[in-house]
Amino acid sequence: MRHVSKVFSNGTLALKDMSLDVRGGEFISLLGPSGCGKSTALRIIAGLGAPTSGSIDWPTSKINQKGLPEGDIGFVFQDPTLMPWSTVYENVRLPLKLKRVAKADSHDRIMDGLASVGLADFAKSYPRELSGGMRMRVSIARAMVTRPKLLLMDEPFAALDEITRQKLNDDVLRLWRQFGMTVIFVTHSVYESAYLSSRIVVMRARPGQVYSDLQIDQPPTREGDYRTSEGYRQTCQTVSEALQSAITAAEVRP
Ligand code: ADP
C-alpha cells in the first residue's frame, strides 16, 4: 500500500496516508480499535473499494482490468456468506465455477479443501445442518480452493465461541504452513493476533493509520502448550501496550 487514503462519500476520513509493505509468506494481523480502518484497508487490497488517493502495487505483471493480480486472492468475511440452498460441496465449488473450471477437474480440489478443514464427511450437507464453526470452515475451504497466494481474512472468528475460535486459529495456522500463502488477518483481539501472526501492524483511529509495526519472533508452530508459554505471554504484553498507546494517541490527537 502506497500512501493510501480513503474518504467515504459522507466525508468520513477512514484512512490517511497508509503505507504498508507486505512480504510473501508473512502472516500479518491488522490490529486496532473498532473504526480505525482495518476493514477498509483490507477491502481496498481486495479491490472491493477504491482508494481516494494512493495505490496498491503488486509484485506481478499479470494484473486484470480491476487492477488485481489474476486469481491470486482469497477473502474470508466475518459472516461465512454461504449459499443456503446449496450443499457444502457446491459452496466450495463456487470460485472454481466462476473461473469455469470443469467439474471433473474441480472434484479433487474441492474434496482436498474440505479434508484440510476436517469436513470431508459433510460434502453433501447443507449449511443449516452445520454449527457456526463448521460453516466458517466451509468458508475457509471455499477461499482456499483456488490456492490463492494471498488470503485476506476480515475478523472471521469474532462471532464464534472461544474454544471454536482457538480450534479455527490452529486450522488457519496449519493451512498457512502447508500452503505457504501470505495472510492478512483483521482482528481487534490482542490474544488472537499474538497467537497467529509473524507480524502485527497496530493501527490507530481518527485518522486510520499504521501506528506500530511489530515483528513477532516466536516459532511458527503455535499449537500444544504455546498458549501458556512465557513467549506468548510476553508477545501479548508487548502487543497490548502498543494497542493501548495507539488508542491513547487517537484520543489525544483527534
Ligand atoms: P474497522 O474495520 O477498523 O472497525 P472500518 O474500516 O470498518 O473500521 O471503518 C473505518 C471508518 O470508516 C469508520 O469510522 C466507519 O464508520 C467508516 N466507514 C466504513 N465504511 C463506510 C462506508 N461505506 N461509508 C461511510 N463510512 C464508512
Image: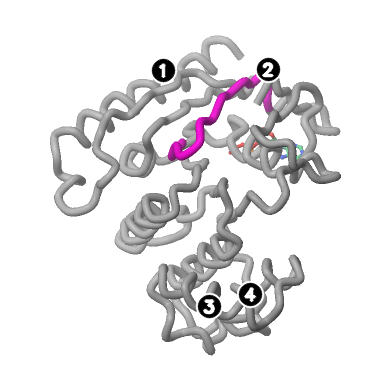
For discs 4 and 3, the disc positioned in front in the rendered view: 3
In three-dimensional space, the C-alpha distance between marks 3 and 1, rounded to whole angstroms, equals: 48 Å
Answer with mark 2 or mark 3, whichever residue precedes in sequence.
2
Q: Which residue matches tag 3?
A: 108
The answer to whether mark 1 and mark 2 are in CB contact below 8 A is: no
Label 2, residues with CA under 10 Å away: few <14, some 14-19, many ≥20 = some
For discs 4 and 1, the disc positioned in front in the rendered view: 4
Height in image: 212 above or below 195?
above
Residue type, mark 3 in image: Asp
Q: For the point 49% across and 70% down, which residue is it?
A: 113
Height in image: 66 above or below 143?
above
Q: Which residue matches tag 1?
A: 245
Q: Which residue matches tag 4?
A: 93
Q: For the point 77% across and 30% down, which residue is it?
A: 51
Residue type, mark 4 in image: Arg
Image quadrant in which the C terminus is located: top right
Is residue 175 shown left or right of residue 99? left
Answer with mark 2 or mark 4, whichever residue precedes in sequence.
2
Q: Is mark 2 within 8 Å of ligand 1?
A: no
